[in-house]
Amino acid sequence: MSILDIGCGPGTIIAGLSKIVVDGKITGLDVTDPIIERARSTFPMSEFPNLTFTVGNAMDLSEIKDNSFDVVHAHQVLVHLTDSVKALKEFYRICKPGGIVACREGNGRSVLSLKPDLSAIRQYWDNTIAPMDRNGAHIDARGHLEEWVRTAGFQKENIVLHMGELRFPSHAEGMKGEGAEQAIKSGIATRDQMNVWREAWEEFDRTEGHELVIENGEILCWKEPL
C-alpha cells in the first residue's frame, strides 16, 4: 500500500501510519524545506525505513504521476488554501482507481467549547484566523467538504461524510521563545499582547478539564475503479 500525507507538518501522523503499514510506501509532503527537514530529522529513515518526506504544493502536484497512491490524506490542509477544489482535483488525479482520498477539516469560526472561557484566548483565536481570512483561505472548510469533493470529481455514492469535533492542545509554548519573537517581528502581535496571551494559556493549562473544541468534518472519498 502507498500513502501520501499532504501537509504532513512535523510528520507525527504519517510516522504513526508507517508503523501500522510496515510493508507500505509512506510519503509525507509539505510546502517548505524547513518543515520537511524537521520531519526528516525527527523521523529518520534509519528508524522509519518505509517513510520518506518531500517538498510540494497541495495545489500543484504535477511532479507526481497520475494514479500513484492508494491513499491520499490531508489533515487541516484545505482550510489554509485559497483554492481547495484545485487541490482536491490534484488529490483525485494522483489517487489510484479504487483508492481513497481522506480529509479532516475544521471550522475555525465555530468554537463549540472553551474552558476556561478566557477573553484573552478568544482574542488570540480571532487574531489567529484573521490573516487566513485576509489571504482568502477557507476558515469554515468543514462545511464545504462534500461540495468540494463532488466538484473535484468524486461521485456522491462514493463519499462518506462525518461531522464531529476537533480538540486543540494548549498554545502556551508558542507564546514564548522563537515563535513569539517571530510573531512580534512580523506584526502579528505586540510584546504586551503576547504576554497577555501567554498568561491566559498558562491559566488554561492549570485549569482542570480545560478544552478548546471547534467543529470538524471528516470525509472519505473512493475513486471509481477502472
Image: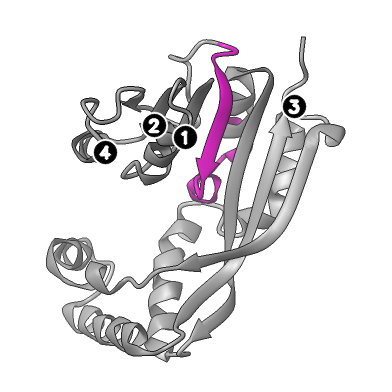
Which mark, residue 20?
A: 1
Task: Measure the C-alpha gap from mark 3 to mark 1.
Answer: 30 Å
* Mark sitting earlier along the chain (3/1): 1
Residue depicted at 57% across the width and 80% down the height: 113
Element type where label 2 sits in the image: strand
Residue depicted at 32% across the width and 88% down the height: 206
Question: Which range of residues does the magenta coloring cover?
Answer: 66-86
User: Is residue 67 inside the magenta stretch?
Assistant: yes
Expressed as whole percent of the image width and height from the top left, the position of residue 49 reads 30, 23
Q: Nearer the viewer, residue 170 or 176?
A: 170
Element type where label 1 sits in the image: helix
Task: Measure the C-alpha gap from mark 4 to mark 3.
Answer: 32 Å
* Mark sitting earlier along the chain (4/1): 1
Query: Mark 2 or 1, which is nearer the eye?
Result: 1
Please identify the quarter of the rendering in which residue 126 is found.
bottom left
Query: Mark 4 or 3, which is nearer the eye?
Result: 4
Task: Measure the C-alpha gap from mark 4 to mark 2.
Answer: 9 Å
